[in-house]
Amino acid sequence: MIEFFHTKERLRFLLYVGAIATPILLISAWVVSSMESSAAAKGEPNDKGGLHYRIQEKSGAKELPPALAALVAVPPNTAMTDVSVDTDGAGRVTSAAVKAFSTDDFKTVAAFYKPTLAPVTTDSAASLEGVRDGYEIRISHEKTFFDNDPYKDRTKIEYTINPAKK
């Protein structure tokens, strides 16, 4: 095999093939990756007969999934960077986890949500929990930052939404 590349013509041919194939492979990988992110943001079928939405900051989605948008509004100065929502066949949220970053402090974000939760079950400096439209909503101030977190200088907020137990 190595003897095949001893001549300059054969080596030049290999370099031409590499120069042509590399950009084609890189562009193909980028297109497939962006198509997958876009499909996940629009919802993919899940095992409950509903849809699973996965939106990350890089997906380019500007809105929350419809089922989640009815429960949680995005406060001013806040960017939701990681959204994972499951719905059932009727379009009701079965579980949701959201990570967000705000330039405001947690107290301001909690004050934004407090009027929408009735009853409020927990109201502390690091957590706000309550019920809205039959869902338990927990909004917490996260102190741990990870390497893949996009904003290290902002307030990290985590939302957890589950159907209320009857």
Image (cartoon, rainbow, N blue to C red):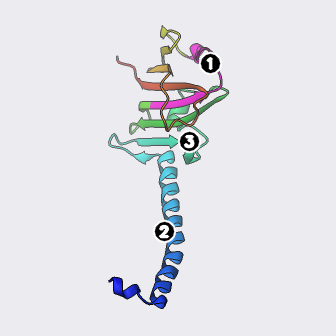
Question: What's the residue type where badge 3 is placed?
Answer: Glu
In three-dimensional space, the C-alpha distance between marks 1 and 2, rounded to whole angstroms, equals 45 Å
Whether residue 10 is situated above or below residue 153 in the rendered picture: below
Q: Nearer the viewer, residue 152 or 111?
A: 152
- Residue 147 position in % (x across, y down): 49, 36
Measure how far apart labels 3 and 1 are at the Cα level: 21 Å
- Residue drawn at x 39%, y 39% is 89
Name the residue that disc number 2 marks: 25
Looking at the image, tell me whether mark 3 or mark 1 is earlier in sequence order.
3
Q: Crowding at label 3, few (<14), some or many (≥20) Cα neighbours within 10 Å?
A: some
Residue 59 pos. (x, y %): 55, 47
Q: Is residue 166 above or below residue 26?
A: above
Magenta highlight on residue 113: yes
Residues marked 2 and 3 touching at CB (< 8 Å): no
What are the residue bounds of the magenta stretch? 97-116
The residue that label 1 is drawn on is: 105
On the image, the x and y values in percent for residue 23 come to: 54, 70
Horizontally, residue 147 falls left or right of residue 3, namely right
Q: Is residue 64 above or below residue 103?
A: below
- Residue 118: within the magenta? no
Callout 1 secondary element? loop
Residue occupying the point 52% across, 38% down:
65
Q: Are marks 1 and 2 in contact (CB under 8 Å)?
A: no
Residue 64 place in picture, x, y as percent: 56, 37
| Residue 23 appears left or right of 112 | left
